[in-house]
């Protein structure tokens, strides 16, 4: 009798398992799309990369396109991309600048597969690395603001081709400034770019409200570099590689001894041996001034009994900060990584000119700021050394569209990147953003 009952139970369980559908979840994929056909660039490099997020089994009716900040990449938006896809019924397309596609990720990709960070480091430090020099890519002098804005337009066309017409455009830091440029831009076919959008989203970034004489000096310096044949900063490729390796090591083996830390002590100013997660924390946390992007924890105390033991990392929730460094490291290794190795100087030159002109630069296609009537939402961090607050207020006053500015409270809790990656960002940023987008789509 027990045997019969057991068989019946087993069959019933099997039938029940067959009848329960697989749980829907957020999916992501990295796409290399056709970019704008910049006439001086070899056709194979007129491409743009996108990290796309969607919720499986539920077709989206709206999308958000996000542009990363200075030196960053699409994975900066991994956390918000997944959250919006699941909770707002949207697709999220996080854009890499076309220069990201020049990067040699041979060994970083392999390290993520087999976990061998030492082998990856040897590849980049011992001659295997296919490092590009300025002379190899002279066409980067044409990869200025217009080329990048036209690439964003191509991404938007791809989304529209999938049947999604309600599209928001946003960005973080430099990406927020580029978002403002796009909204003022006239596309090559003569159409105001903002007319394909429903609204703009600015994460801790804005064109400045006024510029100093330093802009003229910096513009002249960059123009001189480009005229001398320098099309990207020479130290960026190696710096990008080191950044990627730090993130990957923290993701794969957070408690392991960092092999990278001894080689960059002059930058981190930390001479103690570190764990992989501690080096990543030092690289991003505001207390250590390496990149100073987040409030993500602090270094643990050294082992008094064993000074050779690597110093670990105290998690954010143990010391009153906001971003989970371990979770962030895992999110930043998606796509083609979160560092930009070959940032075109032409883009930085044009951004300086656009800032100086207050987004009114017809010869660069910036013609429509005054008439731009889209709604805008801005989320501004407080614990940051950047001065975006006045810029976003001036922008709100200059455009026709209604602007909603969120100064993230309580003051002093969020640094520059925390609006996208803090553990409580879903409550303090993502949910208000979702509600604002819903209001825009409802015509409120």
Image (spheres, rainbow, N blue to C red):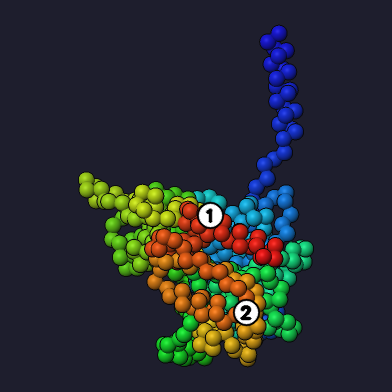
Could you tell me which secondary element the residue under label 2 belongs to?
loop
What's the residue at 59%, 54% (across, down)?
A: 83
Q: Is residue 99 above or below residue 428?
A: below
Q: Residue furthest front?
A: 444
The reply to whether residue 101 is visible in this rendering is: no
Q: Quadrant of the N terminus?
A: top right
At label 2, counting other C-alpha atoms closer than 10 Å, the crowd grade (few under 14, some 14-19, many 20 or more) is some
Give residue 426's mark: 1
User: Image check: 290 left or right of 393?
Assistant: left
Residue 368: x, y in percent?
65, 84
Seen from the viewer's position, the closer of residues 61 and 408 is: 408
Q: Residue furthest top?
A: 1
What's the residue at 64%, 55% (across, down)?
A: 88
Residue 347: x, y in percent?
55, 81
Q: Is residue 357 above or below residue 393?
A: below
What's the residue at 64%, 70% (across, down)?
A: 199
């Amino acid at each position: 009798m027990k045997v019969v009952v057991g068989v019946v139970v087993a069959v019933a369980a099997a039938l029940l398992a067959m009848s329960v559908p697989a749980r829907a979840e957020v999916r992501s994929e990295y796409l290399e799309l056709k970019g704008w056909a910049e006439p001086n660039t070899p056709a194979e490099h007129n491409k743009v990369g996108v990290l796309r997020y969607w919720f499986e089994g539920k077709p989206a009716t709206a999308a958000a396109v996000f542009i990363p900040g200075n030196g960053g990449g699409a994975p900066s938006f991994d956390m918000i991309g997944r959250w919006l896809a699941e909770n707002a019924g949207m697709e999220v397309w996080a854009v890499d600048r076309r220069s990201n596609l020049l990067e040699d990720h041979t060994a970083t990709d392999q390290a993520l597969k087999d976990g061998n960070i030492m082998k990856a480091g040897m590849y980049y430090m011992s001659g295997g690395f296919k490092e590009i020099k300025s002379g190899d890519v002279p066409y980067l002098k044409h990869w200025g603001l217009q080329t990048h804005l036209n690439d964003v337009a191509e991404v938007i066309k791809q989304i529209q081709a999938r049947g999604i017409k309600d599209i928001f455009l946003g960005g973080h830091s430099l990406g927020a400034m580029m978002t403002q440029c796009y909204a003022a831009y006239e596309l090559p076919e003569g159409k105001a770019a903002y007319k394909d959008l429903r609204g703009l989203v600015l994460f801790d970034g804005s064109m400045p409200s006024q510029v100093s004489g330093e802009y003229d000096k910096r513009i002249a310096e960059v123009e001189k570099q480009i005229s001398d044949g320098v099309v990207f900063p020479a130290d960026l490729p190696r710096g990008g590689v080191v950044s990627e390796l730090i993130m990957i090591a923290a993701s794969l083996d957070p408690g392991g001894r960092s092999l990278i830390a001894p080689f960059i002590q002059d930058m981190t100013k930390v001479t103690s041996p570190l764990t992989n997660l501690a080096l990543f924390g030092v690289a991003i946390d505001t207390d250590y001034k390496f990149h100073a992007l987040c409030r993500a924890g602090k270094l643990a105390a050294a082992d008094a009994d064993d000074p050779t033991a690597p110093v670990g990392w105290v998690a954010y929730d143990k010391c009153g900060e906001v971003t989970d460094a371990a979770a962030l490291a895992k999110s930043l290794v998606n796509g083609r990584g979160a560092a930009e190795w070959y940032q075109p100087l032409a883009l930085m030159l044009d951004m300086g000119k656009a800032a100086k002109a207050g987004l009114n630069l017809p010869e660069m296609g910036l013609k429509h700021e005054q008439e731009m009537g889209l709604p805008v939402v801005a989320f501004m961090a407080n614990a940051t050394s950047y001065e975006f607050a006045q810029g976003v207020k001036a922008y709100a006053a200059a455009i026709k569209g209604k602007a909603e500015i969120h100064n993230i409270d309580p003051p002093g809790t969020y640094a520059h990147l925390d609006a996208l990656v803090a553990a409580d960002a879903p409550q303090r940023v993502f949910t208000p953003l979702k509600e604002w987008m819903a209001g825009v789509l409802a015509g409120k």
